[in-house]
Image (tube, helix red, strand yellow):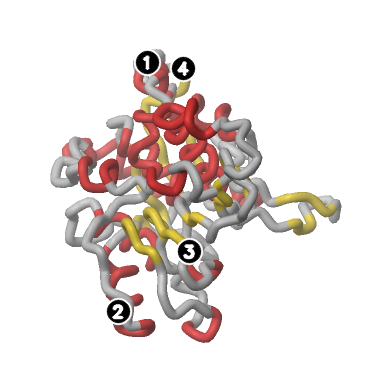
Amino acid sequence: MVSIYGVEVFAWNPVRADVSGRMCHVNNFGDLLGPALVGKLAQKQFFEPILSDDPENGSAISPKLLTVGSIMHFAGDLDTVWGSGVNGKVGVVHHKFSKLDLRALRGPLSGKWLEEHKGIEDPGVYGDPALLLLDAMPNLADLSQQKRFKLSVIPNFHDFDTYRDLPEAVNPRGSVIEILTRLAQSEQIVASSLHGLIVGELLGIPTALFKPSQESIFKYEDYVMGTGRKGLLCHATLDDAVRALAGDREIFDEPLALWDPAPLRQSFPSDLWEPGKQ
């Protein structure tokens, strides 16, 4: 959990053994994007009212906020959800909540899941909050005009050891800023990391998805459908994805052409930072 100006924001970052057996936080960049993005957006909009010296303000911990990631199963009753999604690998029994403050979901598959399994109404506002990264970090647009790398390969963190020896490999457990900078300065991206795909599409970089080894395809389909597309284009292997980039650039022209960011932007839970709510 990360406290952002008095609002508790959930961040999935467990401690696990790395390849050397050393115990450390996973630090998966896709899961760290949520608190980082919320912090930037809250700072831009609410910096003055949030930083209050009033001892009565900010003393109580309100229900938490869940944003980027397949983290719905970590929600509790009355938690606020802005752009999170269901994890296709996690069963209904692990979703303990019965009511949520839903502002937006990653996509319609998560909405359908919540309606069918929990009886919670889909708000109909879709989009992974990472699609608003340029609102919080407009310098990424400038960086994307300064290409330094022909190709970046960013696997899902479960897959990194398979591809770590590739010269184009990007460790998804590295620094969030360094990863975003590397992706922005790439001419092409292939990814089994969902947020590698999202960042590439957001910045207008030709990006191809290849199948992750351990992840359910649910979250990728959920994201794509949440941006107005009907189906997911996922290549069987990394090599297939690279060949697709080389052979048919037209399919990567405007993947977000049908998605309007305004509803997601307007659904940002700014009221959580109102005086007296923290």
Rendered location of residue 59, percent (x, y):
64, 48
Please report the residue visible at 49 percent of the width from the left and 26 percent of the height from the top. Answer: 48
Callout 4: few (<14), some (14-19), or many (20+) C-alpha neighbours within 10 Å?
some
Relative to 266, residue 73 above or below: below
Mark 4 or 1, closer to the camera = 1
Q: Which amino acid does label 2 sit on?
A: Glu
Residue in the foreground of this view, choosing between 253 and 137: 137
Is tag 1's residue or tag 3's residue first in the polypeptide sequence?
A: 3
Task: Residue at 70%, 58% (x, y): give it.
Answer: 14
Q: From what the image shows, is residue 139 above or below residue 84?
A: above
Q: Position of residue 11 (x, y in %)?
A: 59, 52
Specify whether 236 is left or right of 60: left
Identity of the amino acid at label 4? Arg
Disc 4 secondary structure class: loop
Q: Specify which label sits upstream in the sequence, 3 or 2.
A: 3
Q: Name the residue under label 4.
A: 148
Mark 4–mark 3 distance (CA, rounded to whole Å): 42 Å
Classify residue 232 by image quadrant. Answer: bottom left
Q: What residue type is labelled 1?
A: Asp
What amino acid type is highlighted by mark number 3? Asp
Q: In the rendered structure, find residue 142 and report the number of the disc placed on it.
A: 1
Instruction: Say whether marks 3 and 2 touch (CB < 8 Å).
Output: no
**Circle 3 residue:** 79
Q: Can residue 223 be seen in this view?
A: yes
Crowding around mark 2 (Cα neighbors within 10 Å: few <14, some 14 to 19, many 20+) is few
Choose mark 2 or mark 1, whichever is in front. 2
Spatial CA span between label 1 and label 3:
36 Å
Q: Mark 2 points at which residue?
A: 115
Label 4 to label 2, Cα distance in Å?
45 Å
Q: Mark 1: which secondary structure?
A: helix
Helix, strand or loop at mark 2: helix
